[in-house]
Image (spheres, rainbow, N blue to C red):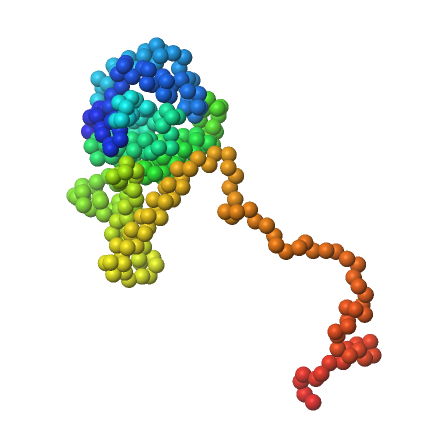
């Protein structure tokens, strides 16, 4: 890895920059005093702007190290900090780092966290040379898991009773994004070929969009045993990307407290329930039976004469 420290990064709607003491008001009122934002964190809401300023003064001193990666998420429209994102726990042997993020409640469900995390992942992997970025989070914090998934971080498992936060002892989800490290003699093009997958890019509207690669489309064609013309392949790529975009949009809905259903609408049985009765007598039951004879039934021959 080539450590660069906290560099200024930019996205269509955000500026990711170093914190200063002047951010105390934004940090305190937007997130650090809010029990809803800190619910799944391991530190309590801060008690005053002054306490937040002391915190930020320490952070400013830490920027002297090129292994400190901590960004204020600034909204370009207002030039106010709305959250924080940082990378820590760097491991030189595995070229890995852990990432944390938090954004003020007022700015939830607007794509800001996804936008910031996507850019930081790009910076860490392309510029710093991190091969694995991972995160741990309370599995009850489903929104955090959805943000990671949108940015290409895949859930690797759950550690039971492995964490503690303001809600108590919790199960931790582990998600990570991994790039293949280069072996001696491998070119960047070869690595790109090895790590082909569905990618996400920032659209003109500031939202993340899915992009299907030609290799992925070719693989889908092989699985489906289809031979697609170039025109058909392009149309299929667009359809698949649109479907994935729509799924991402659905995943942004806050479904906290909503019980899952097997059907979109409640299922109602249109058949009446079985009715138990005592029967209506053997005579009525056997009215349509063949002719009775000697305690049995007389039926036409089916074999022989």
Question: Quick check: 123 above or below 166?
Answer: below
Q: Which residue is drawn at 80% across and 78% down?
A: 292
Q: Residue at x 20, y 32 (%)?
A: 127
Q: Which of 249 and 21 is in front in this view?
A: 249
Residue 99 shown left or right of residue 160 in the figure: left
Q: Which of 133 and 85 is in front in this view?
A: 85
Residue 83, can we see it?
yes
Residue 37 at x, y percent in the picture: 41, 24
Residue 91 at x, y percent in the picture: 28, 28
Q: Which of 29 and 216 is in front in this view?
A: 29
Residue 252 at x, y percent in the picture: 39, 37
Q: Which of 237 and 185 is in front in this view?
A: 237
Question: Quick check: 165 above or below 256?
Answer: above
Q: Which residue is drawn at 81% across and 70% down?
A: 283
- The residue sitting at the front extreme is 77
- Quarter of the image with the N terminus in it: top left
Total marks in image: 0
- The residue sitting at the top extreme is 50
Residue 156, can we see it?
no
- Quarter of the image with the C terminus in it: bottom right
Residue 112 at x, y percent in the picture: 32, 31
Residue 194 shown left or right of residue 225 in the figure: left
Question: Quick check: 146 above or below 194?
Answer: above
- The residue sitting at the bottom extreme is 305
Q: In which quarter of the image is residue 162?
A: top left
Q: Residue at x 41, y 22 (%)?
A: 38
Question: Quick check: 75 above or below 243?
Answer: above
Q: In which quarter of the image is residue 81?
A: top left
């Amino acid at each position: 890895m080539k450590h660069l420290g906290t560099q200024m990064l930019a996205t269509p709607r955000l500026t990711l920059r170093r914190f200063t003491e002047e951010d105390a008001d934004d940090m305190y009122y937007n997130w650090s005093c809010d029990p809803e934002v800190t619910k799944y964190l391991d530190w309590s809401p801060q008690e005053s702007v002054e306490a937040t300023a002391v915190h930020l003064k320490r952070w400013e001193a830490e920027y002297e190290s090129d292994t400190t990666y901590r960004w204020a998420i600034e909204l370009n429209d207002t030039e106010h900090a709305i959250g924080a994102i940082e990378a820590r726990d760097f491991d030189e042997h595995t070229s890995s780092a852990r990432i944390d993020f938090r954004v003020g409640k007022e700015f939830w469900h607007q794509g800001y966290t996804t936008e910031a995390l996507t850019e930081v992942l790009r910076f860490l992997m392309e510029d710093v040379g991190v091969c694995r970025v991972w995160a741990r989070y309370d599995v009850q914090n489903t929104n955090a898991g959805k943000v990671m998934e949108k940015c290409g971080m895949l859930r690797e498992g759950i550690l039971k009773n492995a964490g503690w936060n303001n809600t108590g002892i919790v199960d931790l989800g582990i998600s990570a994004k991994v790039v293949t490290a280069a072996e001696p003699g491998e070119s960047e093009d070869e690595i790109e070929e090895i790590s082909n997958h569905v990618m996400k890019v920032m659209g003109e509207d500031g939202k993340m969009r899915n992009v299907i690669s030609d290799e992925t489309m070719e693989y889908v064609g092989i699985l489906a045993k289809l031979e697609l013309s170039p025109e058909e392949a392009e149309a299929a790529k667009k359809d698949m990307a649109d479907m994935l975009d729509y799924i991402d949009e659905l995943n942004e809905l806050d479904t906290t407290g909503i019980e899952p259903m097997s059907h979109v609408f409640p299922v109602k049985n249109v058949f009446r329930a079985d009715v138990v009765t005592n029967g209506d007598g053997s005579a009525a039951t056997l009215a349509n039976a063949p002719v009775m004879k000697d305690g049995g039934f007389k039926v036409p021959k089916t074999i022989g004469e």
